[in-house]
Image (cartoon, rainbow, N blue to C red):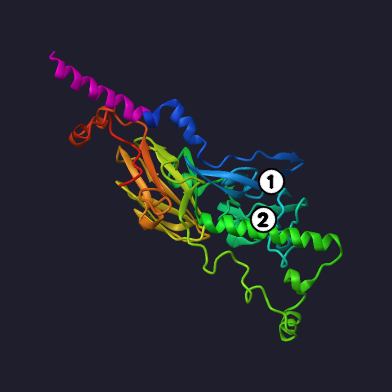
Amino acid sequence: MKRREFLQSTSLLSAAALFPASLLAPEARAANTRRFPKPLQPEMDGEVKVFRLFVDIYQQEVVPGFKFHTLAFNNQVPGPEIRVKRGDKVRVIFKNKTELNHTIHWHGMHVPWRMDGVPYVTQMPVMPGQEFVYEFEAEPQGTHFYHCHWGTLLHMQSGMYGSLIVEEPDDPIRKRFPYQREYTLIYSAHDSNFIRNELNSMLERMKERMYLMKNGRFDKRRFAVFNTKEEFVQAVKDGYLPPYVISRRSRAELPQPNWFTVNGKSYPMTPNIYIKTGENIRLRLINAGTEEHYLHLHGHDFWQVCDDGLPVPQPWQRNTLRLSPGKTLDIIIEGKNRGIWTFHDHDTRRVTNNGLYPGGNLLALVYEDLPAEETELNMMARKMGLPNLPIVALDE
């Protein structure tokens, strides 16, 4: 064999080895499992499943080289996944370790109204250092989530959200589309400048409020809380200026997200979705942010099987779906077209990192049984002098 032929053949072998190995090697697979919500293991108190959640300030790395401070459940973004059976008795002991107020709202759940987590409507906010115990029966079935309902504009995009899965013992989806694996994907959007400035401002306001309360100087007008609407209206007539008249915000405009995440990460650190030929997998899609996403899968149609946690009367095939804020949708992907495929937001403004494409909500559907020869170098890769097909591009 001539030297050139030898070099070409060894280059092809290197490409065939390196490319799939970078996605399918044990260490890569192990790292990928850490990009999905971590299950929270309950304690048992008789028939009651007891979960413990706390919130604290946490520094989240969205991509290598960029971090920002978040408000995180159990020091992780998203918060840990709570998974129970329909009808389970659930108790969540929530501890506030920050200097801000918080609550937890159980989005999509049919909880007693005093457990709904809306401050000044169903409960007082959980103040710094305090605990609150939520108790409910897990209803209805399906894909749901939990999030803070205090200062929601800031707290949700700061990381205070997590998945809540209520399993149906006699799962109709598994009967129709037998699957063994499922993945939870939680989408969000973040204005890092707004988060930084507003979080600092809110912390300063809370220090003032805590000082006044400690010294018995609670004042309804300063705290902007009133017993009735009529009391509030009268206060305005008497000269009270509501906070929306004198803006406290760090900027006049509302947040303009510059980072878009899936499970707290932006491309290229977003999770891979693994599948095999002939396999069905279930994706639980949750929009815990403020932006709409138009999720498109290359090379496949998928079945939309659930809407807001509940099975749809008739599953229907699609390749693009609209995931609005607060929505959850479940889809089934059938392993019918072996390869490595993109699953991304087709509003490409959401596929950016701080304005640079590609980034944000960009994932890969990866077939585990992809033959190595299918990854051999193409002509353009050889012309660019690349040793193997690249799998990370940061600037197109």
Query: Is 7 covered by the magenta stretch?
Result: yes
Does 141 appear above or below 83? below
Q: Residue at x 18, y 17 (%)?
A: 6
Circle 2 sits on which residue? 104
- Residue 5 lies, in percent from the top left, at 15, 19
Give yes or no for contact between labels 2 and 1 (Cβ–Cβ under 8 Å).
yes
Label 1 crowd (10 A; few <14 / some 14-19 / many >=20): some
Does 24 appear above or below 169? above
Three-letter amino acid code at the position of disc 1: Leu
Magenta-colored segment: predominant secondary structure: helix
Q: In this view of the protein, which residue sits in the foreground, 72 or 197?
A: 197
- Residue 36 lies, in percent from the top left, at 52, 41
Q: In this view of the protein, which residue sits in the foreground, 355 or 92?
A: 355
Does 19 appear above or below 253? above
| Residue 246 placement: quadrant | bottom right
Circle 1 sits on which residue? 53
Q: What's the magenta region? A: 1-21
Three-letter amino acid code at the position of disc 2: Ile
Q: Quadrant of the N terminus?
A: top left
- Residue 354 lies, in percent from the top left, at 43, 52
Identify the element where label 2 is drawn: loop
